[in-house]
Image (cartoon, helix red, strand yellow):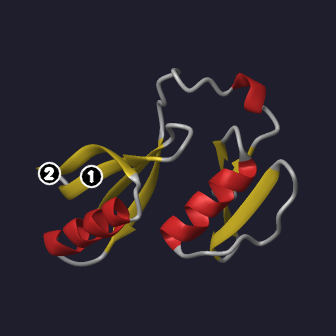
Amino acid sequence: MPAPNLFLVYVTDVERATAFYSGLFDVEPVMTTPRYVPFEVAPGVLFALWSGRADQVAPGTPRTSEVGLMVPGSSAAIDGIHAAWVAKGVTVVEEPHDEIFGRTFVAADPDGNLIRVSPVD
């Protein structure tokens, strides 16, 4: 059975979200359309922005999933990413702290989608 290879994030403004994620992860999209923008994050694996249902994305709705960025290195690597993102003006919703799996923090994109930074499992 194939493994999941497309991860969608619902956004209200695909251009704003494309600029946000391109700058945050230092990646360029595979292609851009008015409502769908995929980024290849590993061979055959896409992280994509989708605004085709933007009318149903309510800013006040709690998000129940997270985009994960697992990074190699020590706690200092996590803290370094936190500092870099804060300098870029990224909204941090959970400051760096130690969890059972290691150092972590959570940021939010302009639509409130959560992005967790943590160490590699």
Which numbered marker is on residue 27?
Answer: none
- Residue at position x 54%, y 69% from top? 23
Q: Is residue 93 visible?
A: yes
- What amino acid is at disc 1? Phe
Left or right of 43: which side holds 60? left
Quarter where residue 55 is shown: top right
- Residue at position x 87%, y 57% from top? 33
Q: Is residue 120 visible?
A: no
Q: Could you say which is closer to the camera, residue 25 or residue 89? A: 89
- Residue at position x 33%, y 71% from top? 71
Q: Which residue is mark 2?
A: 97
**Within 10 Å of the Cα at label 1, are there few (<14), some (14-19), or many (20+) other Cα atoms?**
many
Quarter where residue 69 is shown: bottom left
- Count of numbered circles in the view: 2
Q: Position of residue 41 (x, y in %)?
A: 60, 71
Left or right of 77: which side holds 26? right
Image quadrant occupied by the C terminus: bottom left
**Real-space Cα distance between discs 1 and 2?**
7 Å
- What amino acid is at disc 2? His
| Nearer-N-terminus badge (1/2) | 2
Q: Position of residue 38 (x, y in %)?
A: 74, 62
Q: Which residue is mark 1?
A: 105
Q: Position of residue 84 (x, y in %)?
A: 32, 70
Q: Secondary structure at mark 2?
A: strand
Left or right of 18: which side holds 59? left
Q: Could you say which is closer to the camera, residue 6 or residue 48? A: 48
